Image (cartoon, helix red, strand yellow):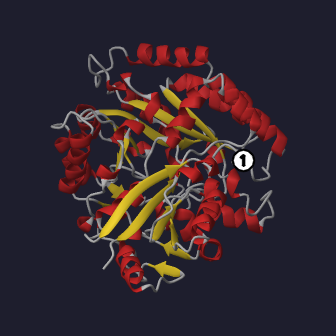
């Protein structure tokens, strides 16, 4: 029987569509770095599916940033597995159309497909809804029999056991194309933030991958890339302290620098911070969202968690950075309680906190989120299907306390101020000055290598 060829294709390279932000980015190194970093991550989901594909299939991995790259893609596959962020989903649909025109079936997976499967089926033919590991074996079986279904769903109530996680096929990549590679240590998040379009759409429970499997992946990366930089592709690392500390002790033996995302609670555990420092943590990205407590009220729907933690933000940032781990503080503009004072409040907080790095985005209604459903019900979406605005930088909602134009202009102005060369140097100096003599630190802080590993990845 003829070997089936499967093309694994990821859309990459999200860019803001706001021309003022694009133009401003030409003179703001910090902002440009974020655009480049978003494009420099391979699709871990596709590599994971490749890792569980049995012998008898020929696999190749490809990325394109926009439709100009379509001519570079091979066209002789038996199946195309496609994944895309919401911001690029219409380009993804055109990629699918090009293959389908040649009689090649396409299956679309990812968060957008999971949130809007009917849209995906109409555009692509087949979609995977939920965790891909639970679906992929059936897809391959149906490919062999020529009976691909329109929709593949994980069995109701079933969650993929990360103890069974396959080793991703990192060998399909050209490591020279990337400034970092991703490894997943956990999936899900214990919080329910109304704006979050992440793996909480795929799994209802927070779960961890066995430490031995995580280390196997890191060693596989090192075999291909002797001096790698790792990003842990987790929604919220280190929620389970026992697992976290076991992992960090294993990492400390590998001498691999890394970056991760976590909630501000990591500051509560000095032992954890010391292990993170010793294990090579360069930076932790934390969603602070707003320096204004009233803007945080109700953002986390289960326990109003972020609102309750706001009064400890400054203390938490100070403690984490005292260990030489830089904090990338993330803020969202356009929250319901945000007035025009929000821009100055973020700027002033960044200065007061001595944050080493800062990230500013706009409130974004991703499909499938509670935020999207609420704004749609309230009639506050500018366009209900403006998926190309799901970049984290483009406005697609009517704010409560200001006009759309004022939110857009205020964001551009704030980004120009925060990411100017002068302010970036000043922020670095404040960090070093503030950190000097802190008890948790080291002589050569881990924070020396940071900003190229600190970008958001829109869903």
Residue 14 rendering spot, x and y as whole percentages: 59, 45
Which quarter shows the N terminus? bottom left
Whether residue 340 is visible: no
Give the camera-side residue of 404 and 60: 60
Q: Quadrant of residue 4?
A: bottom left
Q: Residues within 10 Å of mark 1 (few under 14, many from 20)?
A: some
Would residue 87 be found to the left or right of residue 448 on screen?
A: right
Q: Is residue 46 shown above or below 281?
A: below
Element on which disc 1 rests: loop
- Residue drawn at x 60%, y 14% as measured from the top left: 422
Residue position marked by numbered label 1 in the rendering: 337
Q: Is residue 227 shown above or below 305?
A: above
Q: Quadrant of residue 52?
A: bottom left
- Residue drawn at x 65%, y 29% as measured from the top left: 25
Give the camera-side residue of 337 and 111: 111
Give the camera-side residue of 431 and 268: 431
């Amino acid at each position: 029987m003829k070997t089936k060829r499967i093309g694994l294709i990821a859309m990459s390279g999200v860019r803001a569509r706001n021309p003022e932000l694009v133009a401003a980015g030409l003179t703001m190194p910090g902002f440009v770095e974020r655009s480049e970093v978003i494009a420099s991550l391979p699709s871990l989901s596709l590599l994971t599916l490749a890792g569980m594909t049995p012998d008898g299939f020929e696999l190749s991995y490809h990325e394109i940033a926009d439709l100009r790259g379509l001519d570079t893609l091979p066209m002789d596959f038996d199946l195309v597995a496609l994944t895309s962020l919401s911001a690029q989903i219409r380009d993804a649909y055109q990629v699918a159309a090009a293959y389908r025109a040649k009689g090649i079936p396409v299956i679309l997976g990812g968060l957008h497909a999971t949130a809007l499967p009917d849209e995906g089926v109409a555009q692509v033919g087949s979609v995977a809804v939920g965790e891909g590991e639970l679906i992929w074996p059936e897809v391959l079986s149906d490919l062999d029999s020529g009976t691909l279904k329109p929709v593949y769903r994980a069995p109701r109530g079933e969650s993929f056991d990360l103890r069974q996680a396959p080793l991703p096929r990192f060998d399909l990549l050209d490591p020279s194309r990337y400034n970092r590679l991703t490894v997943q240590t956990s999936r899900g998040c214990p919080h329910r933030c109304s704006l979050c379009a992440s793996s909480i759409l795929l799994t209802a429970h927070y779960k961890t991958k066995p430490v031995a499997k995580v280390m196997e992946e890191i060693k596989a990366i090192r075999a291909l890339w002797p001096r790698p930089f790792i990003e842990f592709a987790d929604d919220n690392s280190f929620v389970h302290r026992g697992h976290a500390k076991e992992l960090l002790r294993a990492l400390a033996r590998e001498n691999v620098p890394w970056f991760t995302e976590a909630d501000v609670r990591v500051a509560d555990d000095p032992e954890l911070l010391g292990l993170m420092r010793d294990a090579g943590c360069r930076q932790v990205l934390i969603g602070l969202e707003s320096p204004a407590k009233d803007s945080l009220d109700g953002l986390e729907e289960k326990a109003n968690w972020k609102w309750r933690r706001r009064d400890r933000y400054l203390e938490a940032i100070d403690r984490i950075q005292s260990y030489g781990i830089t904090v990338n503080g993330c803020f969202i503009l356009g929250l319901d309680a945000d007035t025009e004072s929000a821009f100055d409040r973020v700027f002033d907080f960044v200065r007061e906190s001595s944050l080493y790095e800062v990230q500013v985005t706009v409130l974004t209604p991703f499909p499938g989120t509670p935020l999207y459903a609420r704004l749609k019900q309230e009639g506050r979406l500018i366009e209900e299907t403006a998926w190309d605005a799901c970049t984290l930088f483009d406005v697609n909602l009517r704010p409560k306390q200001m006009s759309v134009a004022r939110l857009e202009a205020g964001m551009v102005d704030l980004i120009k101020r925060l990411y100017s060369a002068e302010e970036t140097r000043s922020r670095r100096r404040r960090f070093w000055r503030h950190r000097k003599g802190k008890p948790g630190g080291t002589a050569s802080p881990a924070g020396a290598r940071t900003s190229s590993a600190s970008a958001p990845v829109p869903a």
